[in-house]
Image (cartoon, helix red, strand yellow):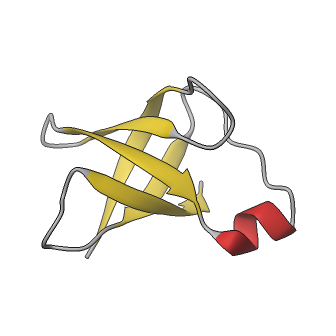
Amino acid sequence: MRRDGIVVAAPNHELYKIALGDGHEITAYCCGRMRRYRIRILVGDRVSVEFSPYDVSQGRIVYRY
């Protein structure tokens, strides 16, 4: 499942807090392709998050708009 959200906080360079459109907040990390090409994510960026329907509190950032 994929949803769009906005980066609210970045306590370290591996985990990010993402606010989804419905008001939920999740923690997410960057996918390997974003690390490989050194795509930086800052607070306030709009991102696409992919997560499992079994655990909706954690996700993986797959795209930065």
Left or right of 57: which side holds 35?
A: right
Q: Nearer the viewer, residue 43 or 17?
A: 17
Position above or below: 28 against 37? above
Left or right of 9: which side holds 39?
A: right
Position above or below: 56 against 40? below
Left or right of 33: which side holds 49?
A: left
Left or right of 42: which side holds 57?
A: left
Number of residue marks: 0
Residue 16 location (% of width, % of height)? 50, 37
Determine the residue positioned at 77% across, 62% down: 35
Determine the residue positioned at 24% across, 73% down: 52
Position above or below: 9 against 37? above
Determine the residue positioned at 54% across, 40% down: 15
Q: Quadrant of residue 19?
A: top left
Q: Quadrant of residue 36?
A: bottom right
Determine the residue positioned at 44% across, 50% down: 28
Q: Nearer the viewer, residue 7 or 56?
A: 56
Residue 17 location (% of width, % of height)? 41, 34
The quarter of the picture where the C terminus appears is: bottom right
Residue 42 location (% of width, % of height)? 66, 32
Q: Nearer the viewer, residue 11 or 49?
A: 11
Residue 1 location (% of width, % of height)? 25, 76
